Image (tube, rainbow, N blue to C red):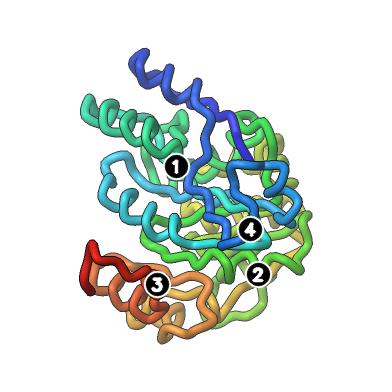
Amino acid sequence: MEQKWLVFVALPSLVIFLTISFTIFSIRVKSPQGAPSSDNPILLNQTSQFSILIGILTRPDNYDRRHFLRLIYGIQSSSIANIDVKFIFCNLTKPEQRIFVALEIMRYDDIVILNCIENMNNGKTYTYFSSLPRILTNHYDYVMKADDDVYIRLDPLALSLQPLPRLDLYYGFVIPCASMNPFVDYMSGMGFLLSWDLIEWIAESDIPANNTFGPEDKQVGKWLKMGNKAKNRFTIKPAMYDYPGTNGRCSHELIPETMAVHRLKRWDQWLHVLNFFNVTKELKQSSLYIF
């Protein structure tokens, strides 16, 4: 799926030209061997049953984290879903950002710059969701908000969504941590997903627009409750969780069925997770390197 993106921020003319004129492919989940290439959207649509946009909310200065996550998501594949991963942040504020981010856009085309002041709980998630219907030429079946310290396994994510409704869906890790009832409160901000109709509602309704300040994940749950929305809810526990030992009952040991692990703040934590899931198992032997 090729999307035309508009960038809502006043930048120097070079960056404006780059961000408005390009066609974004983002981090496209690679096709498995023998599957149609994403370069041919007609063939791709014949095999993709649904589409997902994963927006990773991060900050402009987190260059190293973005480059690392490009590796993490660029090597994954799904045969049943068309998945785009994009990095979401607010207005650029430093001269070096305007150069370095422009270079990233030129090379990767996976960045969305929103018209907001960088924040965590003062409306950034609202701006992200509410902007999408205006800046996308086509919609996705699902839109996900994710943190940049979470590892998402894309194929398990797609498989878990395959049988679920495409409308009025709210999906994630339900809070409180001990609960398995997706209707009890709200989905954790580590990574939650909404169907496209709810994204359109967020963009149009006064309820979200008038309730943007406060913990962003809790606010989303509040919007949906006030609007009598999200009658279809699904919690992915225990497949989504915080890294072992980092957050009480929200944490547990790594399990093979994992869909997402959150609170990966240190490299040793990432190493543990990537080793557990043997992410380099497809590395081909070559005379160019020795492992």
Q: Which mark is residue 115?
A: none
The answer to whether one can see residue 213 in this image is no
Q: Residues within 10 Å of mark 4 (few under 14, many from 20)?
A: few
Secondary structure under tag 3 reads loop
Q: CA distance from mark 1 to mark 2?
A: 25 Å
In the rendered image, which residue does mark 4 sit on?
Answer: 35
Marks 4 and 3, the one that precedes in the sequence: 4
Marks 2 and 3, the one that precedes in the sequence: 2
Q: Which mark is residue 159?
A: 2
Q: Which mark is residue 88?
A: 1
Q: Residues within 10 Å of mark 1 (few under 14, many from 20)?
A: many
Where 137 sits versus 214, above or below?
above
Q: Amino acid at mark 4?
A: Ala
Q: CA distance from mark 1 to mark 3?
A: 25 Å
Residue drawn at (41%, 68%) of the image:
262
Q: Are marks 2 and 4 in contact (CB under 8 Å)?
A: no
Nearer the camera: disc 4 or disc 3: 4
In the rendered image, which residue does mark 3 sit on?
Answer: 279
